[in-house]
Amino acid sequence: MQYQANAEVNLVDKRYLACLTDDGSTYKVKAANQNFLKEHFENGAFKSGETDLTFGNDAVLDSVTNEISSKSPPGLAKKSWESGRKLAVTSGQKSVLVVRVVASDGSTSAPDTYLGNSVFGNNVDSVNLSSQYAACSHNKLEFVKAADKFGTEDANSIKDGVVTVTVSTTVAEGDGPMRNAITAKLNSVFNVSSPNQLANHVMYCLPPGTMNGIAYAYINSWMSVYSDYWCTYVSAQMHGKFYSCDASLCSIRLRQETFFFYSRLLLENQCRNWAQPQYGARK
């Protein structure tokens, strides 16, 4: 679902169906309207991240708009090999990779070091993604840096949980084309089939002006996407990880896209998990 707030922080729901391919690219499914989502997912038996989508011969994938068009909604099928498998891992260590982006006409404003400090602290930023999830979970859930890894280009090596990638797309093309370009670049530079092989969670920090919203995440996925400095705001970080907290498994899947607009003033509300059974009562 899509959560967005105005100045009074009133939330408005919005959602759409998206397809995640084996290589980590995502495409909006145009034929799946709100009634379809409500019938099959909100009130039905299907879940994001645990569903196969099947399309008819009339389906067309547009790599420019990053959309799949068809006359009718896709067929849905539960993934049989995931039967009995628990995707929602809410304890232990989960790795995070922060991706800074250099596009052909713009780049993420914050440097690598600043991005890393905002997510992992590094004894510089005391309020960060890692520290707050540790506090909210009674230290049962820990977000750690993705392992250092050399890429085929020196400038694209992962260091201290952060990497900078360069793509040929422009800011004006929007977040869809740039998101998939980043995915393709990560796969190429690090010789992986999908970015989720680099970390449990991957944060795309887009250049300013690339997207209309603040941030979004795919439910039950590894990917979250942020507009420039919103990648450094712990409130947006935590909501991104809350909705993408289930590890993704490679296949074609359903994704509901989630937008959120929160300020640091809402930080004290982030620890909703204190009331969850897996973490016990607040101490």
Image (tube, rainbow, N blue to C red):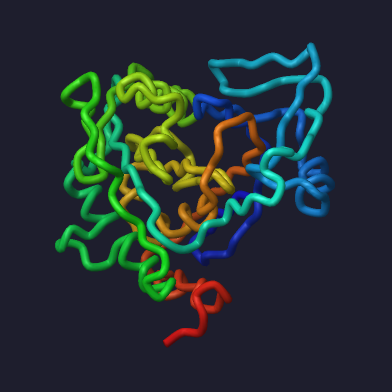
Q: Is residue 70 above or below residue 110?
A: above
Residue 150 in picture, x, y percent from top left:
21, 29
Residue 243 is left or right of residue 215, and the answer is right
- In which quadrant of the rendered image does the C terminus lie? bottom left
**Residue at (30%, 62%) from the top-left corner?**
128
Q: Nearer the viewer, residue 189 or 259?
A: 189
| Vertical placement of residue 45 versus 105, above or below | below
Residue furthest toward the bottom?
A: 283
Q: Where, by quadrant of the figure, is residue 18 drawn?
A: top right
Q: Nearer the viewer, residue 241 or 149?
A: 149
- Residue at 51% from the left image edge and 47% from the top image edge: 247
Which percent across, then down, holds residue 162? 25, 41
Is 197 left, or right, of 126 in this rendering? right
Above or below, 142 relative to 100: below
**Residue in front for this viewpoint, 154 or 167:** 154
Taking the image as shown, residue 252 lies to the left or right of residue 39, namely: left
Residue 172 image point, x, y percent: 41, 24
The residue at 30%/21% (across/down) is: 189
